[in-house]
Amino acid sequence: MNETTKYPINAQEGDLYKEIEVCGERFTLRYGYYEECDRVNPLCRPIPIYPDFLAMPLYTAQGVPFATEIQDACEHFKGKGKRDENSVCGECAHYKRGEDWIGLCECEARSAARSAERIVAKRE
Ligand code: SF4
């Protein structure tokens, strides 16, 4: 079974996949395409689209960054092997599973960087 065969064959772009709540934050997940070329490829069907927390970071009320299991791994990746272009947060020891494919990054180095950003932002 590949990624697309486990979703309903009649799912259309924009259809609701599910609504979930992770650490007090609600997420509405819809079917769609990650790549424009998939939209015009007759072999591709809409799949659930997860938030892009790299493009639009989101934090819990405690300042912990959200991440998805399929998110490209950052420089703090702590996996079984070395980070490469296929490494994702779901393979990282800092990733804490939440609901579905949305969880938290509990990397202290990232939290420290975030705290430093906040201090700089307060000073400005
Ligand atoms: S879980 Fe956090 S530390 Fe690990 S790769 Fe993802 S963003 Fe980086």
Image: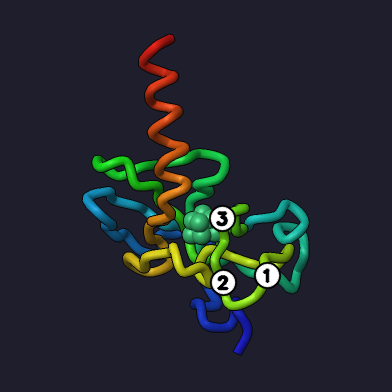
Instruction: Confirm if mark 3 falls within 8 A of ligand 1.
Output: yes
- Image position of 22 with respect to 10: above or below: above
Q: Mark 3 sits on what residue?
A: 76
Spatial CA span between label 1 and label 3: 11 Å
Q: Mark 2 sits on what residue?
A: 79
Spatial CA span between label 3 and label 2: 10 Å
Residue 37 % position (x, y): 77, 56
Name the residue located 36 percent from the left edge and 68 percent from the top edge. Answer: 97
- Image position of 103 with respect to 115: above or below: below
Q: What amino acid does circle 3 point to?
A: His
Q: Is residue 24 left or right of residue 78?
A: left
- Neighbour tally class for label 3: few under 14, some 14-19, many 20 plus, Cα within 10 Å: some
Q: Which mark is residue 82?
A: 1
- Neighbour tally class for label 2: few under 14, some 14-19, many 20 plus, Cα within 10 Å: some
Q: What amino acid does circle 1 point to?
A: Lys
Residue 53 % position (x, y): 50, 47
State the SS at label 1.
loop
Name the residue located 38 percent from the left edge and 33 percent from the top edge. Answer: 115
